[in-house]
Image (cartoon, helix red, strand yellow):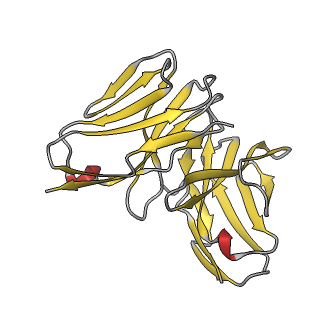
Amino acid sequence: DADVTQTPRNRITKTGKRIMLECSQTKGHDRMYWYRQDPGLGLRLIYYSFDVKDINKGEISDGYSVSRQAQAKFSLSLESAIPNQTALYFCATSDYSIQYFGPGTRLTVT
Amino acid sequence: GENVEQHPSTLSVQEGDSAVIKCTYSDSASNYFPWYKQELGKRPQLIIDIRSNVGEKKDQRIAVTLNKTAKHFSLHITETQPEDSAVYFCAASINDYKLSFGAGTTVTVRA
């Protein structure tokens, strides 16, 4: 499903570094989301956006920020990475209820 | 906010048998309940969903039931096959877009 892409796919970074994860979609959807997945915790919503001017916090937004550069692009930033932000990060899009996920970015903070 | 609990966390079934995963939710205003399947190393994908005005929905070998009074919903997989091995996530939402996911159930189908 190449309609939703994420870069990078894997990243190892050090504590205190700033890192950006990028998401692009060609589905033409207005809604975009960022989740993190941790073993035993499922998928937790970090931020979501309805359009470039409408960005909302999810349940675990502390330590993260986002930018909606265009309808098709939604970036997640970790301003100062810490080890407990080590996780698998997914971007998703939707036009209504069904969410389409990207392939994920595996982030390791050492 | 919404809290979704999912059980069991792991489930091993013999090929051909049925599998049942149960979820409970806390917010009685929730009205949309999707199920996502994540195969190993892959992205989650929607397999079935149900809305609060429906008690049951089927799609071939999978079905979902909803009990609004008890605030729980379940996924039923019949005649399990090896390709059903995956992690399954339930979710609940009051508005279609802000999903609260359960912790996931790892299903293993034994040949």
Residue A107, percent from left and from top: 61, 73
Residue B56, percent from left and from top: 37, 21
Which image quadrant: the N terminus of chain B? top right
The residue lying furthest to the top in this view is B53
Residue shown at 76% from the left, 55% from the top: A61
Residue A39, percent from left and from top: 50, 62
Q: Check the image and report above or below for A68 versus B95.
A: below
Instruction: Count every numbered label the image shows and give the total.
Output: 0
From the viewer's side, name the closer residue of B23 and B95: B23
Which image quadrant: the C terminus of chain B? bottom left
Q: Check the image and report above or below for A6 versus A47.
A: below
Q: Check the image and report above or below for A106 versus A33.
A: below
Residue A92, percent from left and from top: 60, 50
Residue shown at 78% from the left, 42% from the top: A51
> A26 left or right of B46?
right
Q: Check the image and report above or below for A16 versus A67.
A: below
The residue lying furthest to the right in this view is A53
Residue shown at 77% from the left, 66% from the top: A77
